[in-house]
Image (cartoon, rainbow, N blue to C red):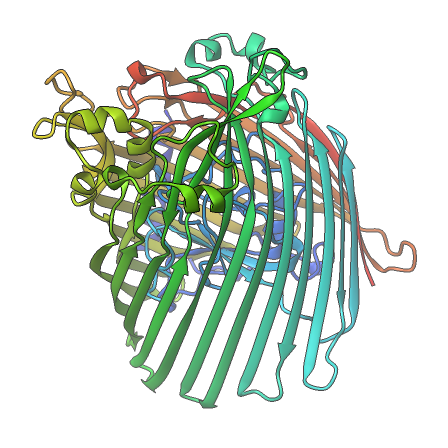
Amino acid sequence: MKKRVLLLSLMASSLLIANPISIERIVVSAQNEDSDYLYMQDANLSESKNQESFTKKSIKVLSSHANMNPFSVIAFSPSVNFSPVDSAGSNEPSFHDPIRIRGKSQTGPGGVFMLNSMPVSSNPGGGKHMVDLENIASIDLLKGYMPVDKNLGFSSLIGKVDMKILAPSKVTKTTLSQSFGSDSFSRTFMRVDSGKVGDFSAFGSLSFLSSDKNKGSGDLDRFNAMLGFSYEPNDQLKADVYVIKNRDKHHNYDSLSYLETKNLKSNYNKDYSSFKKASSNDYYDYNKQDFETTSVLGDITYKPTSKDTISFKAYYKQDEGDYWWSNAKMTDVVMNWNMDHELYGAVASYEHEFMKELKVKLGYWYHRQQPPGPPSDQKKYKVTPSSDLKFAGYAVLSKNDYHTLQSPFIEASGEISKFNYSAGVRYQTFELGSIKSFGNGTNASTSPNYDAAIANGTLDPWASVEARTFYTFLPSLYLGYELSDSSAIYADYTRTYGFNVNLFPTYSQQRAQFVAKGVTLEQLWGKQDLEISENIDLGSKILVGGVTLNPSLFVSFIKNKQANIFDPSLNVGYPSNVGDALGYGAEFAASGAIRDDLEFLLGLSYNKYYFTQDFTTSTGSSSDIKGNQLPDAPEVMIKAALSYYIGRWTFSPSARYTSSRYGDVANTQKVDAFTIVDLDISYKPQEFFGSNDVTFRATVTNLTDEKYISTIITADNALSTSGASTYQTGAPLGVFFSANLKY
């Protein structure tokens, strides 16, 4: 049924392309949401872009009450699967972002989001929610096509979420916001803009957020501070600098086994114990995170002439902290992953417009980031009979060098008659840092101080490797054609990349078995390669009155996807980038104003994503997974939101349907479909406490109190026999209230 609905929508859109309708654009009255009255920015048929741009209106309504996670907003885009474990969107279920785009999940220590087109995010570690969404002007989602100056970071496999920072205002203003609600949720936000003083303007913001977990014991505390400075002496030069400070402390949620999901009603509130137990790691305070992050970004644009633009962007992020979790394989062991790492880089470009038909951009990108990814400092602690933790040595102890990426790029773009195009290419050098392992033979007598343990440790040649470098061309191409003033068709292509760093920790955990068979990490390291995805989109942009329609088809050809394989030549099994996979599907996005008091957002998608090969197991038989949908990748998703304006009231219901998924690549562990319904109601009085720009808001999340599995924690090639898949329940019904005042 769901597939029929999607196909009918695509057929209807095709008919509109053949017979475009020209209706005057409808504009919603701006009194209800300042000037942000549409969920999405209007489509520009002549732009060489294939992206969805979520406006300030979307951020206000779809980010719910927490205003901290951009994924909560883009979750309403077709093919985006994001279902956090709590209503704030604050808890990632493991060491990666719990988001899939077109079925794909992010690999390696690369982050999905960017700030002002700078790849400042990474995984694992802190900084995932280091920007309050009140400080974001818009969010661009790039799923298939990416221009060369945005296809950046340690990984770009699934796309990018580019957040545009709300620059300092040219007028003096103050924004105050207070929220509270279910599970003792409380959030306070304040931003002060100086206005333009001479050639300068600035802003400063603070936020404090706290909440209890929605089940079990534990809480969330987050502090954000941000400063923004802008220098604009004339129309030719603009320079912005932003400084961000973030502190994130929270307890994690426990997961269910597949057997427990079969009786979801009884097990829905299962979580870690509130009390310590002798020789047991089932305790909530053994499962937590505490990170502190500092980030600095600079963005300079200089236009010496009307046809020349010079741009320089620089970024830096440093975060440190601890990730504690219970070891599922040993019920009396608690793990502590200590992280202290940084990343930094810069993007420089020069663009010259020769004519309307030809603009050329030349640029260079440099990026360095320090692990973890892979880990270097993971400690083991034993739970004693007296319920205390006692240091028991290292699970991983190594000295890992920086990963370095650098790339020159060139891009040509322009408009020729009814055609518009963009063609670019990057030549990328991707160096994985060397690893010097000292973990062999560590025990309780080893110093728990990392530097002392390294200084006094013995280098393990079996588990150490030299740096590895990959050289790759990364082309992108967009070609559009305007059929009429209200419709256009387009085709685009982009090559994206990534690398999964699971090999080293796997070797460290199973070192004895590898050594017994005479296999060094270097032997396996040399077999690794970059994961590459060739992405193609075919679609159209159609304007019908106040509505934008965007039906599309897409396909991705993936090479070197990581899989757990058995190598008969070495007689060992290990994770390796040797798999081929295929992803394809259809999307339909629609948004706009139906009447001057009613606007909507709609997303439909169908996705297939699977390995195109089987793998040999240790018994010599085939894994028999070819063609099976990969885990946690729903085939059908339907999302919708609308806003109805009645005087000073705005009613905004929204819903997201996610079809059934699997917890294993053999497709034996099936998880039921679910639908989440939210409701947002806002009211704008004429004046309140001296402010004539006030919004009171009530938000209900999971209105029907649906019991569902939010995220499946598993590898893409996990088999049910491994017992590796675990399942997290979603947030129950929540009610929240907020007041926002501007002066």
Q: What residue is rendered at 63% in x and 76% in y?
A: 230
Q: Is residue 248 visible?
A: yes
Q: Quadrant of the C terminus?
A: bottom right
In the rendered view, tell whether residue 484 sits above or below residue 551.
Answer: below
Position in image of residue 315 (x %, y %): 49, 65
In the image, 63 versus 485, the foreground residue is 63
Residue 421 appears in the picture as rendered: no
Rendered location of residue 105, percent (x, y): 37, 39
* Up/down of 258 relative to 432, above or below: above
Please tell me which residue is depicted at 62% across the width and 64% down the height of the picture: 243
Q: Is residue 553 left or right of residue 445?
A: left
- Side of 510 where 347 appears, left or right: right
Closest to the observer: 699 or 322?
A: 322
Q: Is residue 280 above or below residue 470?
A: above
393 on left or right of 89: left
Which quadrant does the N terminus fall into? top left
* Most foreground residue, 526 or 91: 526
Q: Nearer the viewer, residue 237 or 498?
A: 498
Instruction: Tell me the residue at 72%/64% (across/down).
Output: 204
Q: Residue at x 40, y 88 (%)?
A: 307
Outermost residue, right side: 689
Q: Quadrant of residue 650?
A: top right
Instruction: Answer above or below: position of 638 versus 371.
Output: above
Give x and y (percent) for residue 104.
34, 39
Percent from the top left, x then y, of residue 610? 24, 32
